[in-house]
Image (cartoon, helix red, strand yellow):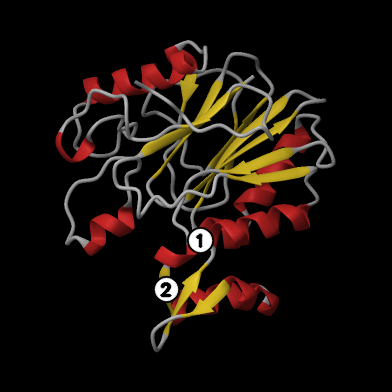
Amino acid sequence: MIAPLISAVLATRHGFFTRAGGVSEGPYASLNCSLSGKDSRDAVMENRARVARALGADPAALVGLTQVHGTAVATVTQPWAAGQGPAADAMVTNIPGIALGIVTADCAPVLFWDPEAEVIGAAHAGWRGAVAGVLEATIAAMSALGASRKNIRAVIGPCIQQASYEVSADLRDAVLARDPADASFFADGRPGHWQFDLPGYCAERLRRAGVAATGSVAVDTVTNENQFFSHRRRTLAGGGQIGHQMSAIVL
């Protein structure tokens, strides 16, 4: 059974879906929504259809992206075929019925809504995209459709939490090169390593961007194996195939 996590901050149809309630098997069990892996395409398409129907959307109206850890934003005016999404890490639309879907396996999915202008957005924020400005780019693309940042609400979904996110100097240096004040998002770890607060960092970038309200579903994808796929957990276990959960929003 599909039971997505939702947030009261977004009073429109949305869901941060877990890995439960699908038809995929093995390492992809069971609600794998990524078409980029080696899972059965038929299984993934059924999983994506279940996500769409859970939101009251036509499965053909659920769109996704070829996510590349960048800042490009697609403005969606009509659905495209599954697996044919542009290379981008965020989407926006003001078309009722179109569902915007982001897949993650530790990165932060962020869903946006302006209730006044009736504009929605969805972003994939790994640390690279977050530092480069994918969240601000999403807000700018929403604004081009008539949204106002003073009305935009944003929620950060389940992702890797600080206690699970050990990083080395290269990541820390990249974050601090942009703004040394962001050292507050790093806690000391073992020698030469730090614990990075990705959702906290995303929340601060949203706050600085001036959005009306920010929420967070503070669930760790790494430590909740039964609920979520996790790239970090897979890496620590020595590799192998992995699925991705979906977060989606629809007007």
Which quadrant of the rendered structure holds the C terminus? top right
Q: Position of residue 19 (x, y in %)?
A: 33, 35
Say which residue appears at 69% left-offset and 35% top-offset. 9
Q: Looking at the image, which is closer to me, 96 or 236?
A: 236
Report whether residue 14 is seen: yes
In this picture, residue 28 sits left or right of residue 220: left
The mark that comes first in sequence, 1 or 2, is 1
Q: What secondary structure is marked by label 1?
A: helix
Q: What secondary structure is marked by label 2?
A: strand
Numbered disc total: 2
Residue 64 versus residue 54 in the image, above or below:
below
Q: Which mark is residue 167?
A: 2
Residue 183 versus residue 88 in the image, above or below:
below
Q: Position of residue 44 (x, y in %)?
A: 28, 26
Which quadrant of the rendered structure holds the N terminus? top left
Residue bearing the label numbered 1: 127
Cα–Cα span, label 1 and label 2: 11 Å
Residue 181 versus residue 3 in the image, above or below:
below
Label 1 crowding class (10 Å Cα cut-off): few <14, some 14-19, many 20+? many
Check disc 1 and give the amino acid type. Trp
Say which residue appears at 30% left-offset and 33% top-offset. 32
Q: Are marks 1 and 2 in contact (CB under 8 Å)?
A: yes
In this picture, residue 177 sits left or right of residue 165: right
Say which residue appears at 47% left-offset and 25% top-offset. 63
Check disc 2 and give the amino acid type. Val
Say which residue appears at 60% left-offset and 51% top-offset. 134
Examine the image and state in which quarter residue 131 appears: bottom right
Q: Position of residue 182 (x, y in %)?
A: 65, 73
Report whether residue 132 is seen: no
The nearer-to-camera label among 1 and 2 is: 2
